[in-house]
């Protein structure tokens, strides 16, 4: 290891001082005293620099230096360099922090940082505005003590993917969308968005569809009535027989579409969760399947693998089963088969409809439950569908906390599975033992 | 007493107990607010089903009251709290009684809303009632906020608002009498309307009581039946005492 030059010169200076003291001591006598004096001088010199180094580390700017080179000069230069660097870094972080604060402050969406105990750590001005929080009093409070809506409390305990829409605590007609995103260790970010407008637009749209459907239904009833009378009348010219029959078919279809639309808007505007009436699924499925068996088309068979019944709304469950089977029958050519299975998997009930029909291309599967979405427009219209059946199924299932799973292979057939959660399922054997 | 004061016990379990029971009071408050909201909605939308649902859900409120009450008794028996903690527990026991009464009044409004849904609605669609309901809802919200933040100033605001609510109730009452004298066919409906107004006015009183417990809890002063002026003085003195201590 080589000695840095600043140390070498320092040691050389010390050696020279001691040598000079020795020479003087030898010349004038008493070299011990001279040596001690020189050493004392050196200690004083070092102590003085130490004192100023201490001051410099305390933040004192101006340090009187005797030398511009050598050990002490370099030590002070390096201390100064470190301090400048730290100062610049601090400035940079300050600026960065201010920018982050300003940008989050400018956000229209509210953001709240929560710790593991749901206590508020920080929030931006938008959150304060949307929720009526105040920076001076609310930091450290549990958020569910200030936002007390039971739905929010439940969501906070178990945040699920899509977030939650709740009535605004500040404005009577306002709606807020809250989403909680976990990050870091045990911290969470709650994003709050004002969705009053979206809600209103949604409601206007729903009301419009509901009103339009109702208004269209009465004139259509009149038209259907006359068409029926025309179809049965004997004195219609032969050339008009086919058009009248076609008109009747189309009027029927229109009636069905309106009926489905009204059903769909009703499902959308109803409260989130369906009633929990006892529904005898087996008693419902038997006649339903028989109805399809009587028609021309693919063969339909029913396999009952469980005796489970459901807690739900009878009309909606019927609607689910009818629409899924109807859909399968329509897209399966004669000669094919449709199998309806009612089974249970670890406490959950599953309604499967397996067909050997035309199937659905993979990229279209997520879209088939959209309103009026048609995989093959020409074909589905010819088969007499309304385009709303699966949308109704999806909404009615949601109201029963169930889910629709679709698996399909183009050209081979599809499987539609309606899955019902455990707490909606009642097994016959349980029911009997409960009564006993 | 400040919120941080809750954190000064040697026994962590005691802190947790106090904090938990305080949180459950507020979640009971959330339930009450929702019940009140839905009852008023049932009235203004003429939704009899919702009204009956509210009446049915009152059992949830009652169940919460019982469980919080038990928890408080347990804390009193096993921890023997003193000073601020004792005031907290006492205030909670009183608060839940008032909350439960608010729940009962909401239940009453729900039943009345269901009944009113089946008769002809006035052209104003009960505007006065909806107005009164809005003020009362704000009072309940403010009272619970004050309880959560231990905010005596906020509590004072709510106590002050009670006068306006009482006046509104008076005017609905008078209006009802006029209607009934003019047209006897409206008597049944107007009686029900008066009952709703009465229930709302009572809810306002309960919200005011809760605020008085908040002031008691924070400053240790009983401010019941002493008049609004004196309450103001007490709150100000209390705030100054707290400031000088910190």
Image (spheres, grey):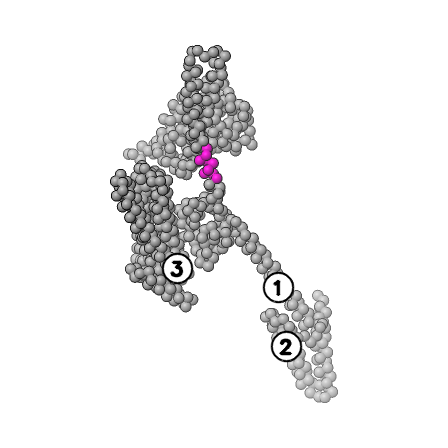
- Residue B219 higher or lower than A282, as above or below: below
Specify the quadrant that holds the N terminus of chain A: bottom right
Residue at 73 percent of width and 84 percent of height: A23
Report the span colored magenta.
Answer: A201-209
Disc 3: which chain?
A: B
Q: Are marks 1 and 3 in contact (CB under 8 Å)?
A: no
Disc 1: which chain?
A: A
Q: Nearer the viewer, residue B216 or B89?
A: B216
Residue at 33 percent of width and 40 percent of height: B122
- Confirm whether the magenta stretch covers residue B12: no
Residue A368 is situated, as x and y percent measured from the top left of the image, at: 51, 31
| Residue A416 placement, left or right of B192 | right
Image-quadrant location for residue B3: bottom left
Tag 1, which secondary structure?
helix
Q: Are marks 2 and 3 in contact (CB under 8 Å)?
A: no
Tag 2, which secondary structure?
helix
Q: Nearer the viewer, mark 1 or mark 3?
A: 3
Disc 2: which chain?
A: A
Image-quadrant location for residue A308: top left
Residue at 37 percent of width and 31 percent of height: A314
Residue A242 is situated, as x and y percent measured from the top left of the image, at: 49, 15
The residue where tag 2 is placed is A48
Same-chain status of marks 2 and 1 = yes
Crowding around mark 1 (Cα neighbors within 10 Å: few <14, some 14 to 19, many 20+) is few
The residue where tag 1 is placed is A87
Crowding around mark 3 (Cα neighbors within 10 Å: few <14, some 14 to 19, many 20+) is some
Residue A328 is situated, as x and y percent measured from the top left of the image, at: 48, 25
């Amino acid at each position: 290891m080589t000695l840095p030059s600043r140390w070498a010169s320092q040691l050389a200076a010390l050696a020279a001082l001691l040598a000079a003291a020795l020479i003087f001591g030898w010349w004038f006598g008493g070299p011990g005293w001279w040596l001690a004096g020189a050493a004392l001088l050196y200690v004083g010199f070092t102590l003085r620099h130490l004192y100023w180094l201490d001051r410099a580390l305390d933040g004192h700017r101006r340090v009187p230096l005797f030398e511009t080179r050598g050990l002490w000069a370099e030590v002070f230069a390096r201390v100064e360099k470190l301090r400048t660097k730290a100062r610049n870094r601090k400035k940079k972080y300050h600026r960065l922090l201010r920018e982050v604060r300003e940008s989050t402050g400018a956000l229209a969406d509210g953001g709240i940082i929560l710790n593991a105990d749901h206590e508020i750590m920080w929030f931006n001005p938008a959150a304060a505005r949307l929720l009526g929080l105040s920076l001076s009093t609310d930091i450290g409070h549990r958020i569910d003590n200030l936002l007390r809506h039971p739905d929010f409390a439940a969501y906070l305990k178990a945040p699920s993917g899509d977030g939650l829409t709740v009535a605004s605590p500040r404005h009577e007609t306002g709606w807020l969308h809250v989403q909680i995103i976990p990050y870091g260790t045990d911290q969470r970010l709650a994003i709050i968005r004002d969705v009053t407008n979206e809600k209103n637009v949604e409601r206007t749209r729903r009301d419009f569809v509901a009103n339009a459907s109702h208004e269209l239904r009465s004139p259509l009833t009149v038209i259907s009535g006359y068409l029926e009378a025309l179809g049965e009348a004997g004195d219609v010219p032969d050339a008009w027989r086919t058009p009248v029959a076609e008109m009747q078919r189309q009027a029927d279809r229109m009636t069905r579409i309106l009926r489905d639309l009204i059903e769909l808007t009703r499902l959308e505007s109803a409260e989130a969760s369906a009633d929990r009436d006892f529904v005898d699924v087996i008693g419902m499925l038997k006649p339903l399947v028989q109805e399809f068996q009587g028609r021309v088309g693919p063969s339909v068979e029913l396999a009952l693998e469980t005796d489970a019944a459901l807690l739900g709304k009878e009309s909606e469950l019927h609607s689910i089963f009818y629409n899924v089977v109807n859909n399968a029958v329509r897209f399966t050519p004669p000669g094919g088969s449709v199998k309806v299975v009612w089974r249970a998997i670890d406490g959950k009930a599953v309604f499967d409809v397996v067909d050997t029909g035309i199937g659905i291309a993979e990229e279209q599967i997520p879209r088939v439950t959209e309103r009026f979405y048609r995989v093959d427009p020409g074909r589905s219209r010819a088969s007499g569908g309304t385009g709303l059946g699966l949308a109704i199924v999806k909404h009615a299932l949601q109201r029963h906390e169930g889910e629709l799973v679709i698996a399909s292979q183009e050209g081979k057939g599809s499987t539609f599975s309606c899955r019902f959660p455990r707490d909606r399922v009642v097994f016959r054997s349980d029911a009997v033992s409960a009564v006993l | 007493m400040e919120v941080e004061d809750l954190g000064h016990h040697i026994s962590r379990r005691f802190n947790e107990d106090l904090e938990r029971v305080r949180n459950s009071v507020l979640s009971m408050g959330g339930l009450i607010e929702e019940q009140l909201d839905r009852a008023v909605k049932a009235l203004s939308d003429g939704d009899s089903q919702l009204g009956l649902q509210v009446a049915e859900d009152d059992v949830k409120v009652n169940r919460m009251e019982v469980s919080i009450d038990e928890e408080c008794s347990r804390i009193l028996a096993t921890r023997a709290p003193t000073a601020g903690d004792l005031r907290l527990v006492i205030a909670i026991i009183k608060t839940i009684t008032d909350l439960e009464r608010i729940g009962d009044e909401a239940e009453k409004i729900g039943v009345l809303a269901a009944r009113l849904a089946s008769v002809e609605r006035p052209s104003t669609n009960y505007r006065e009632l909806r107005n009164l309901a809005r003020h009362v809802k704000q009072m309940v919200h403010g009272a619970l906020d004050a309880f959560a933040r231990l905010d005596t100033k906020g509590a004072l605001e709510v106590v002050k608002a009670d006068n306006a609510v009482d006046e509104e109730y008076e005017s609905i009452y008078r209006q009802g009498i006029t209607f009934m004298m003019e047209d006897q066919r409206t008597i049944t409906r107007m009686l029900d309307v008066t009952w709703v107004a009465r229930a709302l006015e009572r809810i306002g009183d309960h919200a005011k009581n809760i605020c008085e417990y908040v002031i008691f809890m924070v400053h240790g002063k009983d401010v019941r039946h002493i008049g609004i002026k004196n309450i103001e003085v007490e709150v100000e003195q209390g705030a100054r005492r707290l400031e000088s201590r910190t």
